Amino acid sequence: MSINTSVNCFKKNGRSLKLSGTAVNTGNYKAQTEVISSLFDVNVEQKLPRTDSKFKFASKFTTFVNSNRYSTAGVMCSMLLSFGIFAHAAIVPTRAQPLHSDKYSIYASKPLVMEQSTSTVHTKDSRAQKIDAVYKKYSCPMEGLGETFVNEADKANIPWWLVASVAFKESTCGKKMPIVNGVNSFNAWGWGVYGSNIASFDNWARGIETVSKYFGDKFYSKGVTEACDIMKIYTPSSPNGVWCQDVKAFGQEIQNYQTPND
């Protein structure tokens, strides 16, 4: 038996490999496997467990040759089939598999994470601002104590402007106060002053605290809220109700004060 010499020669790595006449014409199995081994760089006789595709083909190819060892056509078909498969594998790339990762891509923006934040905003009470503004208008020594007036009034449950207004009436908002042993009494309200007795305070804030509590406990907690009714107890010697009228008038000026920009 003879075959066309056009299929007797194969090229690999720039060199020609020819099937010997013995391998083709006689079906010599050993000669055929040597040619196959030389062509594909595998040992078809050696059966080693391999996982790569090249050696899987070699294993299948060996099985095919074993079943067709005496068939020249089988050998040639096997060689051509294997060559085609290898060529296809070299030309057609395998499908790329996505790489799974829990990390962020360097090309992607990280998701925004809203962090918790806290802040405290301190605003001055507008009532305190009004007291300070009116006291500034009259150049009162007690200017700047508006917040103290408001805080102590809220604690004593009395009108926020009352003690500041009484200070207007009794001492012209701190300008005229009794002196005790040459020391300022810080008593701008005439509180606890009778005969030769003159009550003194350590500072303005202590006086505001004490007088506010007094008006709350003595009058407002008992339902006495009218300035003229308070006057009858607080300063009964005031002629013709002048004290209560002045206290209310100063109170109205403080409550209704508006800044020049309003």
Image (cartoon, grey):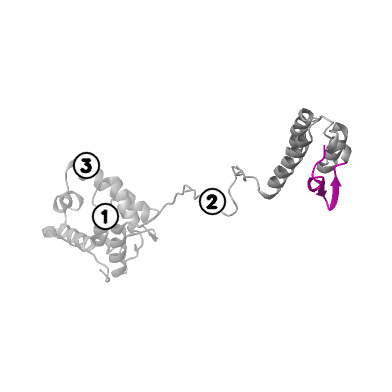
Q: Could you tell me residue 164's position as x and y percent? A: 27, 58
Q: Are marks 2 and 1 in contact (CB under 8 Å)?
A: no
2 or 1: mark nearer the eye = 2
Q: Quadrant of the N terminus?
A: top right
Report which quarter residue 83 is drawn in: top right
User: Residue 221 has which mark?
Assistant: 3
At a point 30% along the width and 46% down the height, the residue shown is: 155
Which residue in the rendered view is the most extreme toward the left?
240
Q: Which of pointers 3 and 2 indicates the residue nearer the eye?
A: 2
Point out the residue furthest to the front here. 1
Instruction: Give the numbered dot on residue 110.
Output: 2
Q: Is residue 173 left or right of residue 20?
A: left
Dividing the picture into quarters, in which one does residue 257 lie?
bottom left
Is residue 53 visible to the viewer in this orientation of the structure? yes
Q: Does the magenta-highlighted stretch encompass residue 3?
A: yes
Q: Outermost residue toward the bottom?
A: 260
The image quadrant of residue 63 is: top right
Question: Of the residues shown, which amino acid type is indicated by label 3?
Answer: Ser
Q: Where in the figure is residue 33, as x and y percent of width and height?
A: 84, 35
How many C-alpha atoms fall within 10 Å of the one at disc 2: few (<14), some, or many (≥20)? few
Left or right for 233, reference 40: left
Question: Vertically, is 227 above or below 32?
Answer: below
Magenta residues, as a range? 1-20
Q: Quickly name the residue at label 1.
A: 163
The tag earlier along the polypeptide, 3 or 2, is 2
Q: CA distance from mark 3 to mark 2?
A: 62 Å
Q: Nearer the viewer, residue 31 or 233?
A: 31
* Percent position of residue 107, x then y: 58, 55
Identity of the amino acid at label 2?
Lys
State yes or no: discs 3 and 1 in contact (Cβ < 8 Å): no
